[in-house]
Image (spheres, coloured by chain):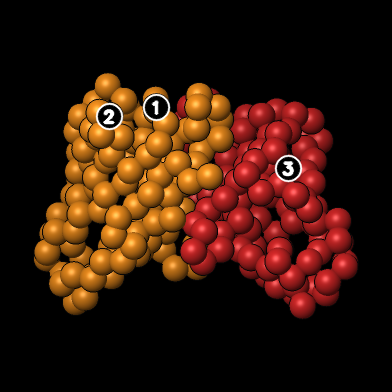
Chain colours: A red, B orange
Amino acid sequence: DAGITQSPRHKVTETGTPVTLRCHQTENHRYMYWYRQDPGHGLRLIHYSYGVKDTDKGEVSDGYSVSRSKTEDFLLTLESATSSQTSVYFCAISDDGQPQHFGDGTRLSIL
Amino acid sequence: SQQGEEDPQALSIQEGENATMNCSYKTSINNLQWYRQNSGRGLVHLILIRSNEREKHSGRLRVTLDTSKKSSSLLITASRAADTASYFCASYQGGSEKLVFGKGTKLTVNP
């Protein structure tokens, strides 16, 4: 795999709790992305980053925040998790105009 | 919003047969990409075709692009059981760095 690690790989938590997912890369790629994947919806972009401290919203950003304090780490935070945020979350990395490389996902269940 | 829409949603074939998946998109593109996702794993980039190309080959994969019809097709020849996976098309939306995915075609190759 292209030097991208997601943690944790699985998490079960309760409604209302904060949750942070981490994406770590060793490829020094400029762009990092967070997606969620749900049956019937395919892959949808939550937020992405185009550099340290530079982020932008995606299609389904409500309820999520991100931070990128260094090139290799991109954090996704659910401030107060809801059941509708139960999903599989994927991180991806790329350079300008290049294909994206994906992590193996985090399966998040919110009860 | 979805940029690409794959057709069919599901496809089941016998080993050795060819599999064809289609993708339609909405806005103008610089390139179109195809990805594969094995069950429980992240997406893997297969092939990229640029807007000025009509056809591209990579091993048993053949991709075509018709920009006048805003459509692309992925052909897998002489399929194998290991080709069983979901296949997604994706393109960058409106010149941005946001890669937008279709909902995918689930391919099952029966031995």
Q: Residue A61: x percent and y percent?
A: 71, 47
Question: In the image, what residue occupies the spot 30% across and 35% down?
Answer: B70
1 and 3 marks on the same chain: no
Pointer 1: residues within 10 angstroms few (<14), some, or many (20+)? some
Pointer 2: residues within 10 angstroms few (<14), some, or many (20+)? some
Instruction: Pinpoint the chain carrying mark 3.
Output: A
Seen in the picture, residue B101 relative to B48 is either above or below; the reply is: below
In primary-sequence order, the first of circles 1 and 2 is 1
Seen in the picture, residue A48 relative to A111 is either above or below; the reply is: above
Kind of residue sitting beneath label 3:
Asp
Quadrant of the drawing holding the C terminus of chain B: bottom left
Front-most of residues A40 and B32: A40
Q: Residue B22: x percent and y percent?
A: 27, 49
> How far is disc 1 from disc 2 in space, using C-alphas?
8 Å
Q: Which residue is mark 3?
A: A73
Seen in the picture, residue A60 relative to B69 is either above or below; the reply is: below
Mark 1 element type: loop
